[in-house]
């Protein structure tokens, strides 16, 4: 993928997230959302290295992964607006939406809980003899959930084609990662005999390269792998978080490393003037058009609230 | 159709074998299920026959159930063995927050086609962490199917139904009943998930039960019959979906209801049965319904203590006798 | 005694502060509870005042609750915050297999003197993994105390009672009610764990409720009163120990019972209340009891859908009106 | 502690376990038991290095730890026989007994679940300003439970005086450890920034030395530590396990390394003839006397079956 293409996607995610924030503030989205502003390069870089048959699982901070996986913006917006979206008809919402048709098995709003499911997706791909992997993203804080440990060990002994991407944004909610996690994620890989790598999560090309290499390695060796991507959360944990807990200067420094600004600068070095501005504009237009479309999706029928809990409604 | 005599655990084993033969996408996973042939022998011979489709896992129940879910939504048909129901508790998030939500939230695009088998109940000496009867916790969770077989025939039929089903099914087998033999029709048609069974007809009282308590209820019933009390016995088999029809029909006839389960009383599924019957046909009850269950306590290891806690056929018999003997409310007496 | 106006969440905060001041062995632990002052502000100012006795933990709920247990049996008095009740499910083993057993098995030598606070329920947009009302799962577990406060006064009183108690207590607060203000007597005597409250008297029907559903019940009651229906309302407050006395007294008077809770219907604690009332004074019921609860489903994120699922004051009102209007059974009519 | 004292204790545990096995076979003990035959040097060595104020937590295979902690044999037998023992009045039984008066908080029959509780005991000891630690024993297979991971990380970041002893007996029930665990326990310590050591678990003096050193280290540094003790299970997983799954020769080789035979040989090199035989005889006599005493303890009163579930019986 070319830098310009990364840029286009990252901009789209950024604009999407900004619009989502506005929709929460105007109460058009009910409740709160968790934005990936500052972390866009990770899903964009990672998904550039994946194939259609790969399974991807994210967290509640997963809009970027859905977009990078190709889920239409309008469907995402509609789902978040509580409409009868083509994704989950309003059942999932911002933190728990699923789009399997796009190779995105879904978000998960229980910290770390997507990993076991990803191992299962990997097991199926292995038994089906395919050349596909399962990729799951979790946060730095999630590394301390029991299910994560259980799954990494089990995936190692069963030899599953599983790639864990840990997005280390320095915080778990309002507490710094360093206060919660004894050892960084990529160093923990050794505890399972796995390859663990570290990458600059604000550089989409570097992420893509690392994911491509680990994906190949996972398929070649039959062993899972772990990639820790360093990044910053440039906004609150959720839409209502004022971030009073961040030490002075920290956010300003993080903004210096904003992956979008950085990539824009890089592109401007080589590309024609206006390339970046055109991409920005295209992203904005796409997002606004998608939002318009989403707003035209009707609300779900309340009579459907308990439909489809079981395969056959036997009662 | 010919019936074969099998123990409960052998019936489970046959159902698993049938599943692996019938569904190429079926897999079995759990602790010690492959090479060691299963801690209770449920998976005996399966690894030898089906190889890598039968998988020994680490002692990691959350990973196990989540893996089954991910495999299921990717086209496999996993059957997970959790050695004791008590160990489900280390994997509750995966069962309740993950498995139970998947179909509904995905609008049916992801199909959590998986079966979780476990066994439960107290046996002499089993400690407080290996003795609980936990079905009520799961019967409260929409999205899960929950069944308890009380004999070899049901163990076979219900497990085949569960594995063939597109829903996530939890089966609570009874360790105490594993050695008990019964007639099993191995080539019967595959049942659907659901369906209670009226195992004895009767005119005086209606007794509803499931799982490990059913044999005790049947023993109590036979003993009561000698005293001229005629008890209808309904084996509920499935708590979800709940088939209340035979219960309502019988209660309309007898006017007296007892529910018997091994789980402790408060918050047990017996409360749901009593509540539903009362809401639906409360006016038909000649006397208040009764629940016969373990006392609300932790299960002690000493058999002297656990026997005092658990409902046994003796206690069941005397409580049923009391129910049958209780004078009907004025009003029913009047209307009779 | 003077009452102070406080929001529900501030009442929780005051009770925690009182505990840390009163019991030198008290500690508070949970995610983001110390330096960040708590995800919902329940622990605001506590770290500043009490330092290392207020502890930020990793996102490791099993470790957290087990640590609280080990600390409790070693002489501390821990109060654990679990951010959402849904997350209790990752720590169920520690709660059910460990905490609940400790006093009984040790014969009281180990005292699991700990409190687990959490909050639950659906709010607009909250997803299926952040919306469940799970009290019934724990009310089925002997060894645990379970309470749900429906207003600021109870939030304060019940949390103080819990922390002062020598038993493991689980408190399910209501996120929806956190901003709601009420009068709180900060220097009231510390209550014991247990005790329902008759919050409204009435002659026609008896409504039993707890937690987040109580304000909706009260709204429905006021609206019904305008139509001449007089409903007694009992806030159960504690599911364990269960104080059924005021319920039985009221039902003996009204002959009509409704139980209202936000948790889904099947297997909810409403079934237990209906079962107990029916078993105890079933003959006094003029009409069958009713349960008003969330439909059996997973909680959807879209408010349009979740409103259809959950009991709101509108649905509660119409179901209560129907209960009041239902013709009494012949027999009670005869005996009346 | 002198070698002879280790020997005496180890013999006592062995005789106790053999008697327990016989009691299961004669059905005087209801159900099954999990014996530590072959692993006696670990509890004996470890407890020799502990102080009275330390908290000890074991597993269902914990009779040896209880005995090494000084719990009277007769009380243990009585508990296992389902009598109204002075320990738990028959409520705990073989796999879940508790003896806090002896500094033994108890066994645990949920794999790995004793570790969180041990962390709490450590936290209390730290806040109470004492110089005591909490020691918890688990098996090799238990290393793959989520709660173990969560607790090791949490204890590390909170700086708790906790020592985890992993008894690696090569098996989890009927499956070899190597098939289940990607990396040995002592190497996993690094994933939490902890000191992890390996010791010959069949040598009580070596175990004592390692535990003494780690205990001092834990108290000095305020960081938990992990000790993996290599050993063999010379009997089945539980009393009814025929061990058909063990490869030919494996058990015979393990018996060559039987810690009791080994220590007997060592003692015979230096001590007077008959020292070992006298210790054997004393152990046998103690165990039989204890069993006699236990048999005189009455069965519990069935009316007590639900007593003491709560502090005050309010109902
Ligand atoms: C089991 C569980 N515990 C707690 C939470 C509440 N929670 C939601 S996000 C979060 C922080 C997660 O931090 P991290 O894993 O670093 O991901 P990030 O939010 O930074 O992307 C917490 C504690 C949860 N969702 N699930
Ligand atoms: C959570 C849980 N899962 C499964 C079991 C069943 N089980 C009891 S012992 C055991 C094997 C444990 O192996 P290891 O930790 O190596 O200890 P060992 O028995 O060898 O001493 C298993 C799987 C359990 N008790 N708890
Ligand atoms: Mg983070
Ligand atoms: Mg082992």
Image (cartoon, coloured by chain):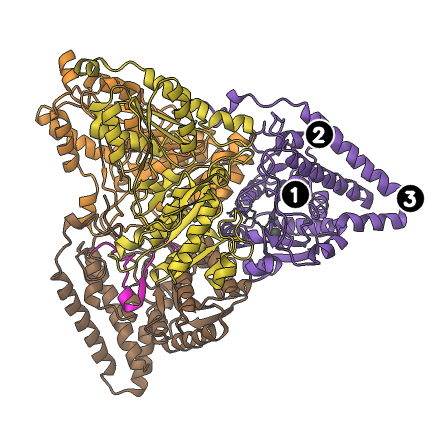
Chain colours: A purple, B orange, C yellow, D brown
Residue at the spot of label 3? A273
- Determine the secondary structure under disc 2: helix
Residue at the spot of label 2? A291
Q: Is residue B192 visible?
A: no
Q: Could you tell me which quadrant the N terminus of chain A lies in? A: top right
Q: Is residue D32 left or right of residue B89?
A: left
Q: Is residue C225 visible?
A: yes
Task: Please tell me which of labels 1 and 2 falls first in the chain.
Answer: 1
- Does the residue tagged 2 have its C-beta within 8 Å of any atom of ligand 1? no
Q: Using a 10 Å C-alpha cutoff, classify the residue at mark 1 as few (fewer than 14 neighbours), some (14 to 19) or many (20 or more).
A: many
Task: Please tell me which of labels 3 and 1 falls first in the chain.
Answer: 1
Q: Position of residue B148 (x, y in %)?
A: 32, 34
Residue at the spot of label 1? A35
Q: Main secondary structure of the magenta part?
A: loop
Of C179 and D152, nearer the camera is C179
Viewer-side label of 2, 3: 2
Label 1 vs label 2: CA separation?
17 Å
The boundaries of the magenta stretch are D90-111
Label 3 vs label 1: CA separation?
30 Å
Q: Could you tell me which quadrant the C terminus of chain A lies in? A: top left
Q: Position of residue D161 (x, y in %)?
A: 44, 68
Q: Position of residue D48 (x, y in %)?
A: 34, 76
Q: Are marks 3 and 1 in contact (CB under 8 Å)?
A: no
């Amino acid at each position: 993928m070319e830098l310009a293409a990364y840029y286009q996607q990252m901009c789209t995610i950024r604009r999407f997230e900004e619009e989502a924030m506005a929709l929460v503030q105007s109460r058009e989205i009910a409740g709160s959302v968790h934005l990936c502003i500052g972390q866009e390069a990770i899903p964009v870089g990672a998904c550039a290295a994946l194939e259609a048959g790969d399974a991807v699982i994210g967290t509640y901070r997963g809009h970027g992964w859905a977009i990078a996986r190709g889920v239409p913006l309008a469907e995402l917006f509609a789902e978040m607006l509580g409409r009868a979206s083509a994704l989950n008809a309003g059942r999932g919402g911002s933190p728990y939406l699923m789009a399997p048709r796009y190779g995105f098995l879904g978000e998960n709003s229980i910290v770390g809980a997507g990993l076991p499911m990803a191992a299962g997706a990997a097991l199926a791909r292995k038994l089906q003899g395919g050349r596909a992997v399962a990729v799951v993203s979790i946060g730095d804080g999630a590394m301390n959930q029991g299910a994560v440990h259980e799954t990494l060990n089990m995936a190692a002994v069963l030899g599953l084609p599983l790639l864990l991407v840990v997005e280390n944004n320095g915080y778990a909610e309002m507490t710094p990662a360093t206060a919660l996690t004894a050892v960084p994620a990529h160093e923990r890989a050794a505890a399972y005999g796995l390859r663990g790598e570290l990458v600059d999560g604000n550089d989409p090309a570097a992420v893509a390269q690392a994911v491509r290499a680990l994906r190949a390695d996972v398929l070649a060796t039959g062993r899972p792998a772990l990639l820790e991507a360093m990044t910053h959360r440039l906004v609150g944990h959720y839409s209502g978080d004022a971030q009073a807990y961040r030490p002075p200067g920290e956010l300003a420094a993080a903004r210096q490393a904003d992956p979008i600004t950085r990539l824009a600068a890089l592109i401007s070095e080589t590309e024609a003037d206006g390339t970046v501005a055109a991409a920005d504009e295209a992203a904005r237009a796409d997002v606004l058009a998608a939002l318009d479309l989403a707003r035209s999706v009707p609300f779900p029928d309340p009579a459907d609230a308990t439909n489809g809990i079981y395969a056959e409604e036997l009662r | 159709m010919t019936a074969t005599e099998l123990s409960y655990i052998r019936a489970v084993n046959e159902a698993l074998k049938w599943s692996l033969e019938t569904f190429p996408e079926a897999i079995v996973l759990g602790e010690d299920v492959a090479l060691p042939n299963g801690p209770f022998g449920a998976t005996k011979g399966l690894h030898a026959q089906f190889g890598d489709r039968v998988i020994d896992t680490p002692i990691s129940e959350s990973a196990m159930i989540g893996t089954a879910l991910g495999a299921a939504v990717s086209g496999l048909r996993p059957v997970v063995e959790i050695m004791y129901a008590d160990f489900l508790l280390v994997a509750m998030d995966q069962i309740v927050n993950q498995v139970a939500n998947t179909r509904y939230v995905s609008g049916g695009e992801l199909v959590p086609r998986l079966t979780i088998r476990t066994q439960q109940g107290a046996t002499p000496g089993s400690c407080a962490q290996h003795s609980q009867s936990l079905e009520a916790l799961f019967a409260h969770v929409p999205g899960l199917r929950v069944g308890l077989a009380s004999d070899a025939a049901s163990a076979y039929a219900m497990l085949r139904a569960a594995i063939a089903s597109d829903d996530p099914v939890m089966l609570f087998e009874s360790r105490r009943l594993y050695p008990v033999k019964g007639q099993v029709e191995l080539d019967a048609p595959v049942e659907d998930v659901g369906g209670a069974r009226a195992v004895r007809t009767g005119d005086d009282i209606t007794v509803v039960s499931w799982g490990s308590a059913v044999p005790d209820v049947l023993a109590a019933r036979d003993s009561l019959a000698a005293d001229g009390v005629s008890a209808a016995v309904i084996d509920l088999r499935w708590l979800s979906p709940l088939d209340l029809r035979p219960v309502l029909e019988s209660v309309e006839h007898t006017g007296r209801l007892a529910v018997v389960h091994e789980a402790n009383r408060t918050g047990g599924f017996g409360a749901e049965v009593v509540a539903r019957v009362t809401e639906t046909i409360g006016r038909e009850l000649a006397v208040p319904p009764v629940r016969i269950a373990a006392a609300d306590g932790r299960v002690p290891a000493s058999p002297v203590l656990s026997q005092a806690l658990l409902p046994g056929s003796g206690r069941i018999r005397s409580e049923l006798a009391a129910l049958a003997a209780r004078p009907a409310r004025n009003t029913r007496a009047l209307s009779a």
